[in-house]
Image: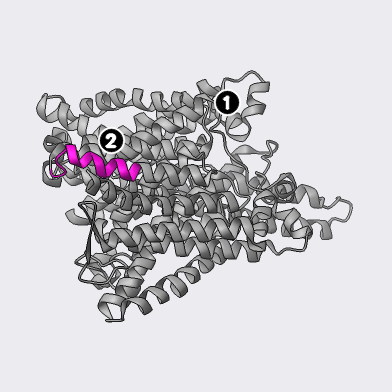
Amino acid sequence: MLSYVLAGLALGSIYAIAAGSLVITFVASGIFNLAFAAMAFAVARCFYFLDTEQGWPLLPAALVSLGVFAPALGVILYGLLFRHLRLRSTLIKLVATIGLSVALPPLINLIFGQLVNVTAPGLAPRPLHVFHVFGAVVNADQLVAYLGLVLVLVVGVGVLRFTDVGLKVRALVDSEAMTSLSGISPGRVSVGVWAASGVLAGLAGILVAPTAGLSAESMTGVMATAFAAVVAARLRSLPVAVLVAIAMGVATGVVQKFIDPESSFAAKAIPSVPFALMLLFLLYHAFRGQAGDVLAGGGLDRSIGTQSNAPASVSTSGNRIRRLRPGVVAAGATIVVVAALPLLMNDYWTGLVTAGICCGIALLSYTLVVGEGGMVWLSQISFAGLGAVLTAELATNRGWSPLLAVAAAALIVTPLGILIGVLTIRLGELYVALVTLSFGLLVTTLVFTQDDIYAYGIGMDIERPEFATDPDTFAYLALGTFLVIGLLIVNLRRSTTGLAVGAVRWSENGARTIGLSVVQTKVVLTALATFVAAVGGGFLAMNFQSTLPDSFNPFLGLVWLAVLVSIGSRSIVAALVAGLMFYLMPGIFATYLPSDFARVPVILFGLGAIAVAKNPEGAIAQIGHDLGGLISRLRAGNGTADASSAPETDPPRANEVSQRSRSEEIKVGGGA
């Protein structure tokens, strides 16, 4: 038994280092760093490059990786991204860190090379020494994990509690503005915090690599386990986070004494425990009213940041049709181009275009829940996967018509979205994101890995409708479905329910004061988004004629969200463009460029999501802003010319021109 306890304690030590770093950075900056695993992979890959590939001795490789590369990575990321996020909304913070988590691993692989064998050494010398403690066996990697946690706790607590540096960090946590007024540079303190975060992430990555493997996917799964400890600590209590992380590690080790770790039951149950615990902690905090959003900085900080973060006001005066025309024309042109693609391409490229259209249907669920509702849901791809599996079950095994099976499967999945919506109403945005991510991971582990569903990664077979078996016809069926759902969303925006959704998105308290039910509004929106996601999943399965369960992994859903938000989370056409980019760009790079550039599209997707830190509305809104400004300048120029030729006419006032320009920007950028 002691051997299992000690093995679990080593794993818990790694969880504790990760959880402690997440808590410290969140408390100091208000940013929950979803890119922690990506940073851990980057430093661990650097260590592997120096130690294994270049043949450096262990100590110099560790010192350069953890003492130079890791802090430099934290400082660079702070300068490029994190410093712009402190007073941003939770949605923008999460999406930006998701973009970083998407872009950083393939970028690191471009620099150091793609690994074929992910087996990697840790910080202990090779070959591993084995120690016997009261009859139990402990290897050197486990011992280093214990020592790493002790060192982090001793140094971390000592610095935070008993030094001037710790005092400055605690002051920054309370208020960046007041810290600045006291003569302390908040920027320098933040740089130090993120440099330390880079070191902790790198340490956790190097320690976990010998057991989990040196890959971004494996590290993401392990680091996601630490989220449960962070949630148990309500994102703020470092001692609670460390203790819960250690307890989870020990429990994971001990349970393997009673369950065969090689069995299919253990393969599903053991990885599910942390995410189930996360859900329980979240619901416990919710029912106690302790799961609201924590605002970064003091009131003075938020007052200073109000002007730059306030939403633009929408003017309702003037000719609505004229203002919508540029956006409508652009949307119509995009749809015409997409409709022409199957006629101009061979079956391979038509298949990719159709996959992009089907993905666009699923992405419309993000348009509803993230764009319209302002809720950070990370489980939409899991709803799509459930829709695909149920569609295949009904169509293939029950003999239903494929289209009828898609609709029925979506109706069956919808209550799950309603249930999650009801359970998360009292949670803050960050907690909602973690709940939905946990749900997606549980679905993947418990459902999609079932033998009859997974089928060695191929999934369940499903045929297309009889009238749409050829690629072109099915492409137009998918495009027609996308347009129908898009029109329904447009109609929703113009309806009373849409007005209620907009009111709740901008201010829940303000919506309550005018008699709107926030719970009812959010539940209706989540139900619609879940239905649309399941429909998209069913169409993806029909396109590939198989469910392909690996294509519905929650971490791949982060890439979906990154692509969509970088283009525009509230734009319907953006969902179509994002879906096409998700499938066409990798195909183009794989066909026409060397294999070394195969991961470049993922990097671009991630960088696009990072760009929301400066442009929260996405690329389409930015284009609309530029187009609106150009139209406004042209109109202003025409007005000036008219005024010079007819001096009796009063020239347009500056504030009227500015208001008209702003209306053009909003209507063009956020409409179709």
Colour scheme of this structure image?
one colour
In the depicted structure, whether residue 465 falls above or below residue 47: above
Provide residue 485's location: percent of width, then percent of height.
38, 33
In the depicted structure, whether residue 351 falls above or below residue 541: below
In the shown orientation, is residue 298 left or right of residue 119?
Answer: right
Q: Is the residue marked by circle 2 packed among few (<14), some (14-19), or many (20+) residues within 10 Å? A: many
In the shown orientation, is residue 570 left or right of residue 378?
Answer: right
Report if residue 254 lies within the magenta region. yes
Would residue 445 be visible to someone looking at this image? Answer: yes
- Label 1 is placed on what type of residue? Ala
The residue shown at (53%, 68%) is 75
- Label 2 is placed on what type of residue? Val
Q: Residue furthest right?
A: 648
Report if residue 283 lies within the magenta region. no
Q: Single out the mark in the foreground, 1 or 2.
A: 2
Q: Are marks 1 and 2 in contact (CB under 8 Å)?
A: no
Residue highlighted by disc 1: 500
Provide residue 468's location: percent of width, then percent of height.
18, 37
The secondary structure making up most of the magenta span is helix
Q: Is the residue marked by circle 1 packed among few (<14), some (14-19), or many (20+) residues within 10 Å? A: some
Q: CA distance from mark 1 to mark 2?
A: 32 Å
Q: Residue furthest front?
A: 134
Residue highlighted by disc 2: 443
The residue shown at (38%, 28%) is 417
In the shown orientation, is residue 477 left or right of residue 223?
Answer: left
Q: Which residues are magenta?
A: 248-262
The residue shown at (67%, 27%) is 510
Quick one: quadrant of the N terminus?
A: top left
Element type at mark 2: helix
